[in-house]
């Protein structure tokens, strides 16, 4: 078996609820009952359990899964003390971010099944969620042809998923995430733009909000400003660029899909003028260039997914970066685990079988 070429994340990175994992708190009850029964019956089958999924994808959550096994596989002794079972297991796995094929074995766990039966629900959930994010982010990164992807779905999901999802997006190629939690596993920081709420707090004056924001944060980040507050992106973009000068990195277009920007009023006909559309981006680019701000970048956001990015790129729309939100957390990428060998004999259910994978590397 090959050796992994990358260092896995330290188990402490994940801040796992170790005691609750050991107790089976996050597990389907039947796995907890299975562990309890095996221990009560003093039945300790040595099994090989293999994990796979059914799509072409990227593997996420594998380091988190290994951390669960290292910290929460084992048993309680008669006095209630925890005895780790990690050193009694033999684990092989692919790496975080590896490309995986349908039904390819991504991990095997060999050892006394009673030591880790209670963890299956938790680690399959991590693998499923993180792989979904990785696959979705990788798809938009590819569609964008190398242009930066900003990962912006935090507001569309529960806050508790941010840390691992942000890591998955980072591994898959997102250039930035929007919260510190999303960036925490690699020691980064969240990035963002001057938001609509700050503009509203300054009476709807985008320029004023941008000025005070840039004065405070220009040394810490690339200053990017939302310019759709007044629904006149081209005019507002030039006003902001004029006010901020070299402090401005980019403007972000986020026009509602129910609105038509003012710069398009005299151009309508033959295209859908709503939301952030190619003609709007072109108008903003032209206005900035004509005013001497060719270096100011344009970030497009608001309902972008793979197909929409592909259309923009195929048409040569002058977008410099895409902010992508809810589409990156939609879909499914479910994983399955099967005991396929027990005490040296084939033991898989009908339709499943042991499928060794030479790509797997043993986990230390």
Image: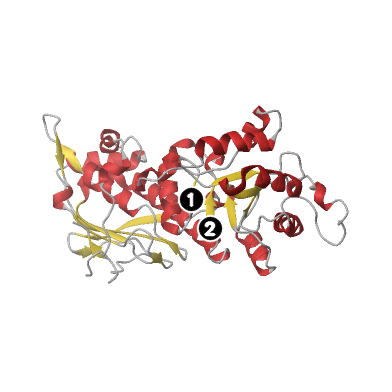
Name the colour scheme: secondary structure
Q: Please rate how many residues cluster around mark 1, counting C-alpha atoms within 10 Å: few if below 14, some from 14 to 19, many from 20.
A: many
Judge the density around disc 2: few (<14), some (14-19), many (≥20) Cα neighbours within 10 Å.
some
- What percent of the width, then of the height, locates residue 134? 46, 56
Q: Which residue is mark 1?
A: 176
Q: Residue furthest bottom?
A: 358
Q: Could you tell me which residue is drawn at 34 percent across and 60 percent down?
A: 349
Image check: 70 left or right of 355? left
Name which residue lies at 63% across and 61% down: 309
**Residue at 61% in and 57% down:** 295
Q: Residue 120, percent across and down? A: 32, 47
Q: Which mark is residue 148?
A: 2
| Residue 93: % across, % down | 28, 61
Q: Give the mark count.
A: 2
Element under disc 1: strand
- In the image, 191 versus 55, the foreground residue is 191
Q: Examine the image and state in which quarter residue 197 appears.
A: top right
Circles 2 and 1 in contact, beta carbons < 8 Å: yes
Quadrant containing the C terminus in the rendered view: bottom left
Q: Is residue 21 above or below residue 321?
A: above
Q: Position of residue 208 (x, y in %)?
A: 66, 34
Mark found first going from the N terminus, 2 or 1: 2
Relative depth, front residue between 186 and 168? 186
Q: Is residue 56 above or below residue 175?
A: below
Residue 330 vs residue 292, the one in the foreground: 292
In the picture, the quarter occupied by the N terminus is bottom left
């Amino acid at each position: 078996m090959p050796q992994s070429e990358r260092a896995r994340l330290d188990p402490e990175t994940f801040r796992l609820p170790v005691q609750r994992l050991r107790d089976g708190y996050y597990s389907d009850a039947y796995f907890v009952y299975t562990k309890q029964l095996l221990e009560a019956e003093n039945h300790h089958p040595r099994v090989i359990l293999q994990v796979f999924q059914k799509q072409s994808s990227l593997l996420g959550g594998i380091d988190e899964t290994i951390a669960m096994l290292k910290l929460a596989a084992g048993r309680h002794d008669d006095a209630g003390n925890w005895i780790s079972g990690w050193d009694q297991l033999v684990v092989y796995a692919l790496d975080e971010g590896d490309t995986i094929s349908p039904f390819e074995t991504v991990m095997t766990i060999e050892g006394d099944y009673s030591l880790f039966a209670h963890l299956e629900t938790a680690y399959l959930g991590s693998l499923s969620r993180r792989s979904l994010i990785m696959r979705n982010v990788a798809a938009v990164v590819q569609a964008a042809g190398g242009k930066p992807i900003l990962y912006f779905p935090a507001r569309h999901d529960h806050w508790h998923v941010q840390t691992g999802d942000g890591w998955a997006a980072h591994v898959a190629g997102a250039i930035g995430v929007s919260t510190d939690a999303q960036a925490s596993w690699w020691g980064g920081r969240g990035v963002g733009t001057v938001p609509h709420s700050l503009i509203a707090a300054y009476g709807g004056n985008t320029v004023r909000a941008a000025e005070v924001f840039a004065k405070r944060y220009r040394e810490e980040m690339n200053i990017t400003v939302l310019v759709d507050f007044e629904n006149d992106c081209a005019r507002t973009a030039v006003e902001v660029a004029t006010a901020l000068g070299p402090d401005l990195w980019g403007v972000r277009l986020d026009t509602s899909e129910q609105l038509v920007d003012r710069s398009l009023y005299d151009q309508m006909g033959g295209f859908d003028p709503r939301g952030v559309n190619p003609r709007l981006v072109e108008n903003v680019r032209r206005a900035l260039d004509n005013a001497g701000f060719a270096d100011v970048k344009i970030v497009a956001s608001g309902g972008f997914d793979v197909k929409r990015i592909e259309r923009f790129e195929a048409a040569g729309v002058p977008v410099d970066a895409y902010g992508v939100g809810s589409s990156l957390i939609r879909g499914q990428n479910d994983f399955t685990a099967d005991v396929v060998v027990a005490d040296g004999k084939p033991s898989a259910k009908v339709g499943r079988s042991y499928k060794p994978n030479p790509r797997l590397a043993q986990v230390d």
